[in-house]
Image (cartoon, rainbow, N blue to C red):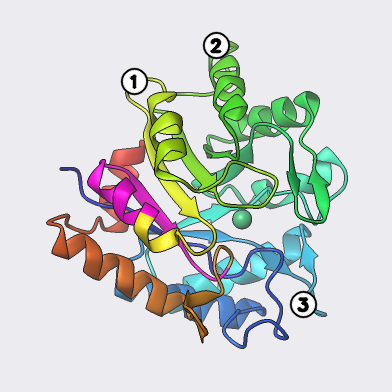
Amino acid sequence: MEKLIITVAPTGNLPTRELTPHVPLTAAEIAADIAACHAAGAAICHIHARDDAGRPTHEVKYFAAILGELDKTGCPIVRQISTGGRAGKTPEARAEGLTLNPLSASLTTGSTNFPNMAYVNDPALVDYLAGVMRERNIKPELEIFDVAMIANALDLKKRGLLKEPLQFNLVMGIKGAIPATPKNLLFLVDSLPPGAVWSVSIIGPEHVRLSMMAMAMGGHVRVGVEDNIWLSKGVLATNVAQVERIAALARAMGREIATPDEAKKILGLG
Ligand code: ZN
């Protein structure tokens, strides 16, 4: 079976210091945590930025600071910039981080509800972000919160906005989006086009079990404090502990861990 790509999502938009001491917030904290996660087996990092007060931001200077700190560590991990929408308002604001030309960026192909808000990605915004990524040769990781978003991605492909192989991340378990169940995972994977590369981000108590199911099916896995602040019941998670656990489970089931260079090959990056 193909080597496993582990992505770490260390920060996200929601975790705060009040919720967990283990969320990295400053550029230096995020870079140090990512480098440690790479040492534990992560090949890709999914980056959100926070401003000086720790609030989510799309301002390019904050993304640039994180990449700068990461470069200082010499860590070869693949950089993926989030265009996720809780922080920015206009399409241009959502795309600010893309001006840094990362190899990879996230692209959500539709709208959904989150527990306390609607997560709106209207068709014009999705087209705009996909177009900027195509111009800059940035590979979109398609963030899928429900099956309609797979159909939307296929429509983007049909209209020439995406290049193969398509890369999907199946985000399951957020209240308001597709629930994290084995049946739903099979359904989503079955709905992907031939040749697609896919991973899962499982939010909530099923995250270890369904991540293992994905690994057994040939999928890849994203972990990190963005998706789960709990390692197990009552135990707060560090990013490194989450990466270490997935790497150990993968080795136990006979899947080797991909390096950043191997991940680039699998995904057709750069
Ligand atoms: Zn994210």
Q: Amino acid at mark 2?
A: Lys
Q: Is residue 149 above or below residue 112?
A: above
Res. 164 in view: no
Judge left or right: residue 126 versus residue 256.
right
**Residue located beneath label 3 in the image:** 54
Residue drawn at (78%, 54%), measured in percent from left and top? 86
Query: Ligand 1 is located in which of the four quadrants?
Result: bottom right
**Residue located beneath label 1 in the image:** 194
Residue 156: x and y in percent read 60, 19
Residue drawn at (59%, 34%), measured in percent from left and top? 146
Residue 244: x and y in percent read 32, 74
Region in magenta: 210-225
How many residues crowd mark 1 within 10 Å: few (<14), some (14–19), many (20+)?
few
- Numbered marks: total: 3
**Residue located beneath label 2 in the image:** 158
Mark sitting on residue 179: none
Residue 161: x and y in percent read 59, 21
State the residue lying farthest toward the top. Answer: 158
68 or 146, nearer to the observer: 146
How many residues crowd mark 2 within 10 Å: few (<14), some (14–19), many (20+)?
few
